[in-house]
Image (cartoon, rainbow, N blue to C red):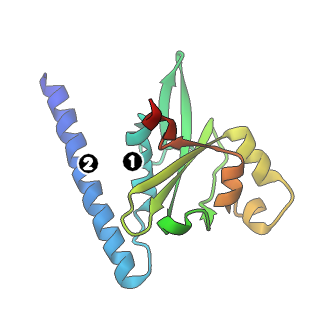
Amino acid sequence: MDTADQTAAFRESSIRTLLRQAKQIGAEYYRLTSKPLGVTGEVAEYEAAEKLGLTLAVARTPAFDAFRDFNGGQIRYQIKGRAVPKADRYKGMVPKIVDGDFECVLLVLLDKATLDAIEIWQADRESVMKRLDAPGGRARNERRAMAISQFKSISRKVWPDEGAADR
């Protein structure tokens, strides 16, 4: 392993350690205050990248958070995270979806007690924009957000892969 590979491996290990600590602190903060600490988005991005093999985009890249090289191009993902009770994971809203250059939206459902990923759902851009633009309430049309149950109806679960246990 050359020096660049060692540096990258060390950096990745350090990030994993920091995020593990952030998840623990965030979960404990919520237990004590009933308020989120504000790390859900970052944890969701990292969980999605790690579990789905994505490359995180540079911070503050407009409209997408991660990408995957595919057939000579890129698939860009906007990642949304929501901390939910594990037993009642489909209640609540998906955070604001920003229009722009992306192909898919990933919704990472995190266990509110631990901030560990429970499920990841993926919807294509066209389905998401069509749902957000459909006549309806202020949440969808003005705030550009939708209920988790609405997002599920236009998406497919991409993690965990239940079929993997059967193979």
What residue sits 63% from the left and 51% below the top? 98
Picture quarter with the N terminus: top left
Res. 115 image quadrant = bottom left
Q: Secondary structure at mark 2?
A: helix
In-image side of 10 versus 148 (left or right): left
71 sits left or right of 167 in the view:
right
What residue sits 50% from the left and 36% below the top?
163
Residue 97 in the figure: left or right of residue 118: right
For the point 32% across and 62% down, which residue is it? 23
Visible in this render: residue 120? Answer: yes
Q: Position of residue 22 (x, y in %)?
A: 30, 62
> Where's residue 24, x and y in %?
29, 66
In the depicted structure, whether residue 64 falls above or below residue 116: above
Quadrant showing the C terminus:
top left
Please, what is the three-letter code of the amino acid marked with disc 2? Ile
Q: Which residue is situated farthest in the front direction here?
A: 166
Q: Secondary structure at mark 1?
A: helix
In the rendered image, which residue does mark 2 sit on? 15
Find residue 84 and name its label: none
Residue count near mark 1 (Cα–Cα under 10 Å), binned few <14, some 14–19, many ≥20: many
Q: Is residue 117 above or below residue 7?
A: below
As measured in the structure, the alpha-carbon distance from the residue carrying label 1 to the one carrying label 2 is 9 Å
Asked if labels 2 and 1 touch by Cβ distance under 8 angstroms, the answer is yes
Q: N-terminal of the two: label 1 or label 2?
A: 2
User: How many numbered discs?
Assistant: 2
Q: Amino acid at mark 1?
A: Tyr
Where residue 100 appears, x then y in whole percent?
65, 42
Q: Position of residue 107 (x, y in %)?
A: 56, 51
Mark sitting on residue 46: 1
